[in-house]
Image (tube, helix red, strand yellow):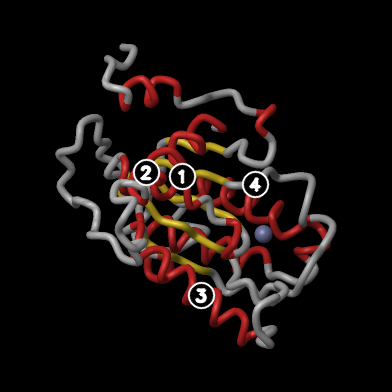
Amino acid sequence: MTRIVWLASTLLSGISGAQPNQPPQTTLPPPPRESSAPGAVAARVLLVAAHPDDEDTGLIAWLARGRSVETAYLSLTRGDGGQNLIGNELGEALGVIRTQELLAARRIDGAHQFFTRAYDFGFSKSSAETFTHWPREELLGDVVKVVRAFRPDIIVALFAESGGHGQHQVSAILAREAYDVASDTVRFPVRTFGRPWTPLKFYRTARFAPAAATLTATAVKNHNDGSNPPR
Ligand SMILES: [Zn+2]
């Protein structure tokens, strides 16, 4: 996964550095909907994490713009509990700002943006502690709703289910549970949560733990270099 991030960074630097004498672009044309790019993949990918600044912008841009994959980012919270080093807004006001930041990012990379009802109450040490603040079943229902609405072929958790910030752990837990139950219309009725959907794959990025990677994008890198991808 390190390779993916590196590749995306390279791609992005290529975009911004194409015209070195021009002022930096603040907007880019929308990515092609009907993909004709070499190596384009007809798929939908949903990335899941806890906070606005958890987003893997490199991976999102690489998928949405580089590979013409319909991509979405689900942030469980709006980052209300974060710190603000450039202004006085905190709590809900900060959540509004960070929401707008994500929406602005999506206007650039062309991906979709989703949230759940989860309120960012600040740091917690474990998923168990986080679930004392968050209603687990309701939040899982929110994630199932997003999965059924966006209908991803692949769900990517950006964090592991243990270690680090408790809200990060919960994002991984709920991403995996939603992958397992998005087709269960008894637990999550169609009338409330939408038509059932069964994603094909579940991945977890190794962005914060590169040594844990079991899969890299070597084939993709070769293809983007102009060589033939392995069959
Ligand atoms: Zn976070």
Query: What residue is shown with label 4?
Result: 159
Horizontal side of residue 40 vs 75, given as left or right: left
Q: How many labels does the image show?
A: 4
Residue found 58% across the figure and 73% down from its top: 78
Q: Which amino acid does label 4 sit on?
A: Phe
Q: Distance between the residues labelled 4 and 3?
A: 20 Å
Horizontal side of residue 180 vs 226, given as left or right: right
Query: What residue is shown with label 1?
Result: 59
Regarding residue 198, the answer to whether it shows in the image is: no
Q: Distance between the residues labelled 3 and 2?
A: 21 Å
Say which element carries label 3.
helix
Q: How far apart are marks 3 and 1 (CA)?
A: 19 Å
* Foreground: disc 4 or disc 1: 1
Q: Which amino acid does label 1 sit on?
A: Leu
Query: What residue is shown with label 2?
Result: 63
Q: Is residue 136 above or below residue 10?
A: below
Q: Do the residues labelled 1 and 2 touch (CB within 8 Å)?
A: yes
Q: Where is residue 155 in the image (x, y as percent from the top left)?
A: 47, 45
Disc number placed over residue 99 in the picture, else none: 3
Residue found 26% across the figure and 21% down from its top: 226
Say which element carries label 2.
helix
Confirm or reject: label 4 Cβ below 8 Å from ligand 1: yes
Residue furthest out toward the top: 231
Q: Distance between the residues labelled 1 and 2?
A: 6 Å
